[in-house]
Image (tube, rainbow, N blue to C red):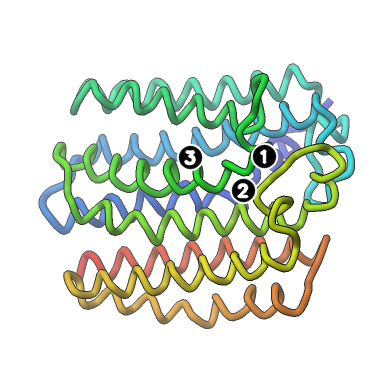
Amino acid sequence: MASLSDFVRGARPRTLPAALVPVAVGLAVAGSRGSINPLNSFLAFVVALSVEIGTNYANDYSDGIRGTDENRVGPTRLVASGLATARSVKYAAYGAFSITAVAGFIIALRTSLWLIPIGGLCILAGWLYTGGPKPYGYIAMGEVSVFIFFGLVAVVGTSYAALDRLIPFSFLAAVPVGLLAVDLLMINNIRDIEGDKRSGKNTLAVLLGDKKSRYLYIFILAVAFVFAAALAFSKPVVLDIFLALPLAAVPVRKVLSGADKGDLIAVLADTGRLQLAFGVLLVIGILL
């Protein structure tokens, strides 16, 4: 039987910056325009973390019962490794998504009921990434979904929840945030290319191949910095994001040097640290 620590690892803590950063940036955008709502801001963090954890458990469950994770290189998965039953992991996903639904519903009641269908789409996207009869993560659509939900929806939605109105600048701030979230998925899929090929999981990395996928990872990283720098026309202090360049150099060097399999697990962690530092600096730049 899986222990609590097993389920904590199954929540994939290294991916959680992808949930925290967009909320922090969205709150910074709202805070730069007015007085934010404390309860809605807290609930936005709850929504982001719970939907990310729910998606991770759903991915573990769906890939596990399909056999996709049997030959994986990365961290151990609960279902594929036999640490936990598929049923228990499925209910862990349901539990996390239930928290998402409750917290999101409260925000919607306090702001706009239009957030209810948007929240429903977020949960549905989390489940259908590798779940359902035709998972979109198996047809190279994962990166698009991550950009939409962990970039645009998360940043814009958070700023709206915190201030109860749409802020045009939030759409621009969401772009570099979404791109860095995409790179987290890209490096994860580059690591799993061989295993995913054998399992019939046609991620973008599988379709492009190892070399092109590595170049795309670096290109996305560069575009994130360039786009964030362009925000300096409205918020000059945003140029502080370049203080994160040394952290960007670490994963870029490893990717270019041909790091593979287990070594790419470290690159995933490096990318997560970069995303977190970039997000903190972007928040500071927006607020100042």
Tell me which label, 2 or 3, sits earlier in the chain.
Answer: 2
The answer to whether any part of residue 92 appears in the image is: yes
Q: Residue at x 74, y 17 (%)?
A: 87
Quadrant of residue 118 within the rendered picture: top left
- Which of the labelled discs sits on residue 140, or is there none? none
Q: Residue at x 66, y 59 (%)?
A: 187
Q: Residue at x 19, y 74 (%)?
A: 233
Which residue is labeled 2 in the image? 13
Label 2, residues with CA under 10 Å away: few <14, some 14-19, many ≥20: some
Name the quadrant of the N terminus. Answer: top right
Where is residue 191 drawn, in percent x and y? 76, 57
Label 2 vs label 3: CA separation? Answer: 10 Å
In the image, residue 39 sits, relative to residue 36, either above or below, namely above
Label 1, residues with CA under 10 Å away: few <14, some 14-19, many ≥20: few
Name the quadrant of the C terminus. Answer: bottom left
Depth check: give the residue in front, 263 or 35.
263
Which residue is labeled 1 in the image? 8
Which numbered mark, 3 or 1, is in the foreground of this view?
Answer: 3
Badges 1 and 2: C-beta atoms under 8 Å apart? yes
Where is residue 166 drawn, in percent x and y? 17, 42
Label 3, residues with CA under 10 Å away: few <14, some 14-19, many ≥20: many
The answer to whether any part of residue 2 appears in the image is: no
Tell me which label, 3 or 1, sits earlier in the chain.
Answer: 1
Badges 2 and 3: C-beta atoms under 8 Å apart? no
Depth check: give the residue in front, 146 or 82.
146
Where is residue 123 drawn, in percent x and y? 48, 27
Q: Secondary structure at mark 2?
A: helix
Q: Residue at x 34, y 69 (%)?
A: 228
Which residue is labeled 3 in the image? 49
In the image, residue 143 sits, relative to residue 94, either above or below, namely below
Residue 44 appears left or right of 245: left
Q: Amino acid at mark 1?
A: Val
